[in-house]
């Protein structure tokens, strides 16, 4: 990602984006594969954008997974619709994240520093089942530092386009699974709050937005013509 005005200290910083893990009965094979890839990649920052568990009981498996996927400078987590729907409270997720050395961004921001420069990560609550508050999340942001926004359901990006808010360098979301099951010749089926978004880059909304196909599955425990995905983004001075 080429970022205008990026401080030289942030040039080359890497961000690992993980989403839609969907733990339902322990650490499944995709979860374990991501742990190995994260160790190999050794990102500066790891961003995890919700739908991580399908039961409060899975929080115990989530802690070692998050710990294995940590970024060297910071690891941040946001809530997805599944967390809200199964009763995972912000407090419970905050404790789970903290035990793994991560930070829950529940309508708040976190400043990452490298080489004397600052990058602000802005995390929002889920738009489908929660209550995103971008103004609240921006309340304590560092003035003048580039921002990356992270949230679960991408449909909210078009809501943000109509708001008088500062524009981030780019944004990351998940939720859609890329359609998960993609029969030939049929349009992808995505969950509510996906909006018009399916997967990949969108540059016609409030900021450049990348929508990940995610890691796990929901409903049908399979994917067809829609492989799982993690994203690695490297920021450079434009």
Image (spheres, grey):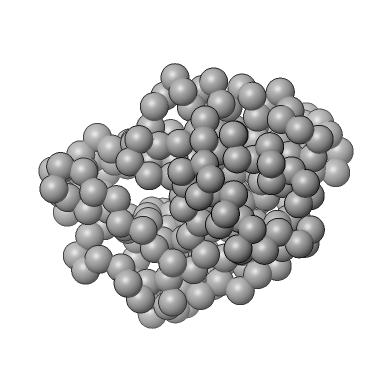
Task: Residue at 76% x, 33% y: name it.
Answer: 26
Give the camera-side residue of 177 and 184: 177
Task: Residue at 35% x, 35% y: name it.
Answer: 72
Res 87 quadrant in image: bottom right
Q: Quadrant of the N terminus?
A: top left
Whether residue 170 sits left or right of residue 193 in the image: it is left
Res 115 quadrant in image: top left
Q: Residue furthest right?
A: 220
Q: Quadrant of the C terminus?
A: top left
Image position, residue 33 (x, y; %): 61, 22
Residue 27 visible in the shown view: yes
Give the camera-side residue of 209 and 16: 16
Q: Is residue 196 above or below residue 70?
A: below
Q: Is residue 187 above or below residue 12?
A: below
Image position, residue 40 (x, y; %): 44, 19
Whether residue 170 sits left or right of residue 230 in the image: it is left
Task: Residue at 57% x, 54% y: name it.
Answer: 95
Image position, residue 99 (x, y; %): 53, 45
Residue 173 visible in the shown view: no
Whether residue 171 sits left or right of residue 174 in the image: it is left
Task: Residue at 45% x, 36% y: name it.
Answer: 70
Give the camera-side residue of 166 and 34: 34
Res 183 quadrant in image: top right
Image position, residue 207 (x, y; %): 40, 60
């Amino acid at each position: 990602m080429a970022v205008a005005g990026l401080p030289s200290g942030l040039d080359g910083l890497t961000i690992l984006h993980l989403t839609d893990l969907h733990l339902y009965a322990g650490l499944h094979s995709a979860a374990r594969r991501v742990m190995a890839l994260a160790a190999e990649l050794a990102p500066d920052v790891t961003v995890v954008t919700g739908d991580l568990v399908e039961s409060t009981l899975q929080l115990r498996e989530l802690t070692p997974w998050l710990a294995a996927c940590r970024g060297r400078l910071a690891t941040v987590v946001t809530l997805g619709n599944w967390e809200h729907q199964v009763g995972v409270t912000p407090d419970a997720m905050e404790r789970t994240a903290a035990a793994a050395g991560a930070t829950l961004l529940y309508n708040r921001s976190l400043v990452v520093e490298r080489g004397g420069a600052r990058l602000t990560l802005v995390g929002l609550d889920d738009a489908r089942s929660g209550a995103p508050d971008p103004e609240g999340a921006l309340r304590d942001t560092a003035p003048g530092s580039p921002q990356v926004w992270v949230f679960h359901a991408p449909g909210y990006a078009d809501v943000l386009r109509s708001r008088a808010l500062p524009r981030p360098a780019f944004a990351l979301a998940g939720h859609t699974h890329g359609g998960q099951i993609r029969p030939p010749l049929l349009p992808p089926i995505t969950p509510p709050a996906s909006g018009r978004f399916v997967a990949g880059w969108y540059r016609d909304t409030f900021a450049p937005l990348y929508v990940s196909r995610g890691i796990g599955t929901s409903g049908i425990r399979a994917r067809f013509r829609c492989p799982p995905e993690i994203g690695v983004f490297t920021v450079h001075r434009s």
